[in-house]
Amino acid sequence: MWEPSLTDREMTNRERFGRQCTLLGLRAPYSLDAGAEYLGILVDPRDVAKAVRGPKNDGLPLRKVAALLGTHDGVVASLIAAGHLASYRAVNSVNRCPQTLVAPQEIKRFKATYVSLHELAKKRRLYIGTMKSKLDAAGIQPAFDPKEVGATFYLRRTIGGLRLNRR
């Protein structure tokens, strides 16, 4: 077990903090008021941010993915769990906690391949139930089980040339 040396025991808080800043690679702190202890120590916040933040991730968190897909967090989590949306785990650059992220390219791929019943109904200014009935009548089936993912998605290529107007 490590035992502090006599010099470490005699070190003031200001000196200890200065040593920690040096170990982090921060510029030497300086004090405006010698009697203020920690409150009198100033460091450049940009230096502190560089020292404590991890590398930036390009992926998007699930809440942002849900907003981009026009759905909610539970649907995104279900899409990932079912293997319809690829994700990866990475450490958050600010709080250093592991989080699930989705690559922007994966979101583009998903949006180019699938369309939600909600989005279809909204674009055509129809109620969701009416839109669903028209798709069922045309023989178009959802791309995945709606009970599995919590929302109804269709393949865009099956909807492509279909004329589903308001009547």
Image (cartoon, grey):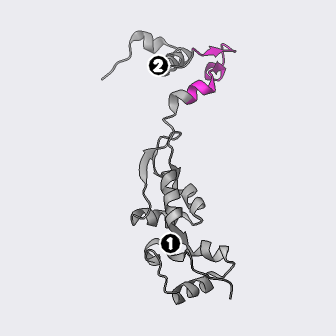
User: Looking at the rendering, which quadrant does residue 36 occupy?
Assistant: top right
Horizontal and vertical percent position of residue 21? 52, 20
Above or below — where is 24 with respect to 145?
Answer: above
Residue at 45%, 74% in the rendered image: 143
- Characterize the local packing of mark 2: few (<14), some (14-19) or many (20 or more) Cα atoms within 10 angstroms: few
Identity of the residue furthest to the left in this view? 1
Nearer to me, 124 or 59: 124
Verify CB contact (< 8 Å) between mark 2 and mark 1: no
Above or below — where is 99 with respect to 68?
Answer: above
Identity of the residue furthest to the top in this view? 7
Residue at 56%, 84% in the rendered image: 132
Quickly name the residue at label 2.
23
Horizontal and vertical percent position of residue 98? 44, 46
The disc label shown at residue 130, or none: none
- Characterize the local packing of mark 1: few (<14), some (14-19) or many (20 or more) Cα atoms within 10 angstroms: few
Q: Secondary structure at mark 2?
A: helix
Magenta residues span: 28-49
Looking at numbered disc 1 in the image, what kind of residue is underneath it?
Answer: Arg
Q: Secondary structure at mark 1?
A: helix
Residue at 54%, 84% in the rendered image: 135
- Mark with earlier residue (2, 1): 2
User: Looking at the rendering, which quadrant does residue 46 occupy?
Assistant: top right
Quickly name the residue at label 1.
157
Nearer to me, 18 or 163: 163
Q: Is residue 76 magenta?
A: no
Q: Is residue 31 magenta?
A: yes
User: Looking at the rendering, which quadrant does residue 129 occupy?
Assistant: bottom right
